[in-house]
Image: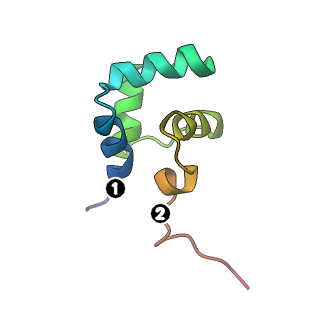
Amino acid sequence: MGTIKRRIILINARKHKNWLQKDVVEKLCNEFGITITESYYGMIEQGVRTPSLDIALAISALFGMEPSKIFLNNNTTFCCF
């Protein structure tokens, strides 16, 4: 996938609901009081930007998904012993 890892799960979840990026931004504002631009949300989907914890949690709640499923790349998450 290259150096930028698109968040395919997030994109597919939005498309499954037939929402535009604009719809997600509006719902984040109306339901969670989080104000971001469409451009910023698009960068989150493209993996160019990593959202703050509160934004990541709100996006996850909006789609009814675990944050780790959207925002963590388990292939690069290591545990040290």
Q: Residue at x 32, y 26 (%)?
A: 19
- List the residue tagged with mark 2: 73
* Residue 81 shown left or right of residue 26 in the figure: right
Residue 31: percent from left, percent from top = 58, 19
The C terminus lies in quadrant: bottom right
**Corner quadrant of residue 22:** top left
Tag 1: residue type?
Lys
Q: Secondary structure at mark 2?
A: loop
- List the residue tagged with mark 1: 5
Sequence order check, earlier mark of 2 and 1: 1
Mark 1 is surrounded, within 10 Å at the Cα level, by few (under 14), some (14 to 19) or many (20 or more) other residues, namely: few
**Corner quadrant of residue 16:** top left
Mark 2 is surrounded, within 10 Å at the Cα level, by few (under 14), some (14 to 19) or many (20 or more) other residues, namely: few
Q: Residue at x 32, y 53 (%)?
A: 4
> Disc 2, disc 1: CB below 8 Å?
yes
Q: Residue at x 56, y 51 (%)?
A: 66
* Residue 19 shown left or right of residue 58 in the figure: left
